[in-house]
Image (cartoon, grey):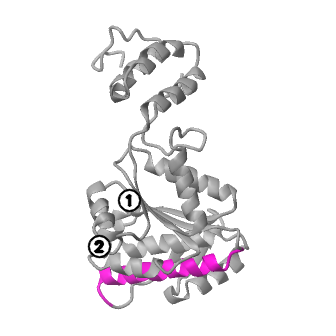
Amino acid sequence: MKNPFEFGRELGIGELVDRNSEVAEVEEVIKSGRKLFLIGPRRYGKTSILKAAEDKLQIANSVVLRLDAESYPTLEMLVNGIVAGAAKQLKSGVERAGEQIRKFFSRLRPELDFSLSDSAWTAKVSVGSGSEKQGGVTLLVEALNGLESLAKAQPPGRAVGLVIDEFQKVIELGGDSAEAQIRAAIQRHKRTGYVFAGSKTQMLSAMTMDASRPFYRLGTVRFLGRCPGPTLKLSSDRSLLRVGSKCRILQRSVLSLTWLRMSRTTFRCWLTVAGTNFATASPSSPQF
């Protein structure tokens, strides 16, 4: 029997529970061309919220680029990812898409390549003169401006958005001037929606709530908390009932526990599903 308690992966639209308002807010920000900072510790569901919103927007034919800043060692590589992602979103054929990307991101002079075997785009831009940090920020600003040009070329009903997870990494790579330069660019953008998410809560809180910082009042700030206990218990109940008849035991164990004790009892609940008598089991038990 499959373990119903899974960690460390993105959840699909049908799997994510008790985050409807957060997903809806991300969708609305993209559709309306606004800015949102989504802040919360790791394993609070930020990435799954972003994925669920992205999936819903793409069903509606929106252009959504979602990137994890921690996956890119340099800003130049992040910019390459943005340009390649934009090319992927254009559904006008390889040759036509390449022409459009070179037009929208003309200041970056991107070198584009499309792999027929992988059906994937790659892009290459250059830092040019200046320090690596300063050059990287300049490239990122030009990429954001290029994305806005792409957004303006879309039909009125087609939303365009950029979602950057672990956004604090961008500022760490870009240095002290990155915040001001990014704000100067995107505060003029009316067609592209931006969602910047991150897990370094103290750093991002200071970045967005300190009146002396450039991102102050740039957009909405959403602090992500734990899922509400009672609603989560009900949703968990419904999901577990689909696992099998043995989950009736879980109703009397998991759902009778407080939300704060939920994580501690997860392994016992799974032992119950697997048919183990958890009254005598422990984390050090050979059965585990």
Read off the residue under disc 1: 166
Percent across and percent down for residue 151 are: 62, 76
Quadrant location, the C terminus? top left
Quadrant location, the N terminus? top right
Q: Residue furthest bottom?
A: 129
Of 64 and 24, which appears nearest the observer?
A: 24
Percent across and percent down for residue 263 are: 35, 29
Q: Is the residue under label 2 in contact with that under label 1 (CB below 8 Å)?
A: no
Residue 122: tell me if it is visible.
no
Task: Report the residue at 65% width, 82% height from top.
Answer: 100
Read off the residue under disc 2: 213
Q: Range of the magenta residues?
A: 130-155
Task: Report the residue at 27% width, 63% height from top.
Answer: 206
Task: Report the residue at 52% width, 78% height from top.
Answer: 189
Percent across and percent down for residue 150 are: 61, 78
Percent across and percent down for residue 285 are: 30, 15
As drawn, the label of residue 29 is: none
Residue 148: tell me if it is visible.
yes
Report if residue 139 lies within the magenta region.
yes
- Residue type at mark 2? Arg
